[in-house]
């Protein structure tokens, strides 16, 4: 049985997510309206920039707003709520032990939970692809920057989902897992600029360039902004961010799968 094909965990997670959306119809309608208005405005801006004589400038600004301002921010805020309750809810509903005693392998359990949390994020990113294509074309965004920026979005989604799933595995309550996940993600997003400020204060008598502060490279906002800047491309910044994101994702998933593969030792007492 494959992790993605014929995985009952993945199918169960998707069905439960759909049922939960049906139970909160008012929230679903409000969310659809808000997202629809934002996307409609973005598409309108993209079409205007397509026929505007100043399109290179508007297109580049629109691309930055779409990728950095919206998509990256949505990943930071939404990912913990999607993935942090994947395992803790099973514990709270007292179905986790039964899942561990089933014939499913550890990889199928972790993989099903992981990809079920990723699918809504990928659908959200796919919604912005036409806008990004138009903005990149009119804003004269090079193919390399376009591909790297979307690869950075995918890597961020993979890494932050793995972080949230890991805390869902080590925690017993959804609230604790969500808080820990969001705190860790915000540390990477907000904490690194704070460390940069402290570092620059300690370097008052010497020239200090933010690009020389390596911990800031882990911040997806900085990596994306550096990638989309009009200057020369700095492969070390985006390369380090991608390496840490993919490596961290693999490490967290491997650790969760390895511990679950021990079988009865992981059963709840």
Image (cartoon, helix red, strand yellow):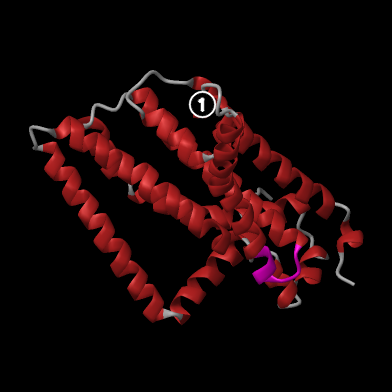
Which residue is drawn at the image coordinates 68% and 64% (left, top)? 177
Task: Inspect this view and state whether residue 113 appears.
Answer: no
Extreme residue toward the front, this view = 205
Residue pictured at 71% horizontal, 46% vertical: 253
Q: Is residue 68 magenta?
A: no
Q: Position of residue 4 (x, y in %)?
A: 60, 49
The x and y percentages for residue 69 are 37, 48
Residue 157 seen by the camera: yes
Q: In this rendering, would 54 be left or right of 109?
A: left
The one nearer the camera, 216 or 53, is 216
SS at badge 1: helix
Q: Is residue 8 left or right of residue 206?
A: right
Q: Foreground: 214 or 54?
A: 214
In the picture of the structure, the residue carrying the numbered disc 1 is 211
The boundaries of the magenta stretch are 171-177
Snapshot quadrant of residue 104: bottom right
Query: Quarter-wise, where is residue 170 in the image?
Result: bottom right
């Amino acid at each position: 049985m494959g992790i993605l094909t014929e995985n009952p965990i993945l199918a169960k997670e998707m069905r439960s997510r759909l049922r939960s959306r049906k139970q909160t119809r008012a929230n679903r309608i409000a969310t659809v309206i808000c997202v629809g208005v934002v996307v409609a405005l973005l598409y309108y801006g993209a079409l205007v920039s397509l026929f505007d004589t100043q399109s290179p400038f508007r297109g580049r600004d629109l691309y930055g707003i779409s990728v950095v301002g919206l998509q990256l921010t949505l990943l930071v805020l939404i990912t913990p709520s999607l993935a942090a309750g994947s395992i803790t809810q099973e514990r709270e509903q007292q179905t986790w032990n039964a899942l561990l005693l089933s014939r499913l392998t550890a990889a199928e359990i972790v993989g099903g939970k992981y990809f079920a949390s990723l699918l809504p994020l990928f659908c959200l990113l796919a919604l912005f692809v036409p806008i990004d294509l138009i903005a990149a074309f009119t804003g004269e965004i090079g193919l390399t920057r376009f591909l790297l920026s979307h690869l950075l979005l995918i890597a961020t989604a993979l890494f932050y989902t793995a972080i949230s799933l890991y805390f869902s595995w080590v925690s017993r309550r959804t609230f604790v897992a969500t808080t820990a996940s969001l705190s860790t993600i915000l540390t990477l997003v907000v904490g690194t600029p704070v460390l940069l400020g402290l570092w620059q204060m300690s370097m008052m008598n010497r020239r200090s360039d933010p690009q020389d502060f390596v911990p800031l490279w882990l911040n997806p906002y900085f990596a994306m902004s550096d990638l989309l800047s009009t200057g020369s491309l700095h492969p070390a910044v985006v390369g380090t961010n991608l390496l840490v994101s993919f490596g961290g994702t693999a490490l967290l998933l491997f650790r969760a799968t390895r511990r679950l593969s021990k079988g009865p030792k992981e059963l709840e007492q």
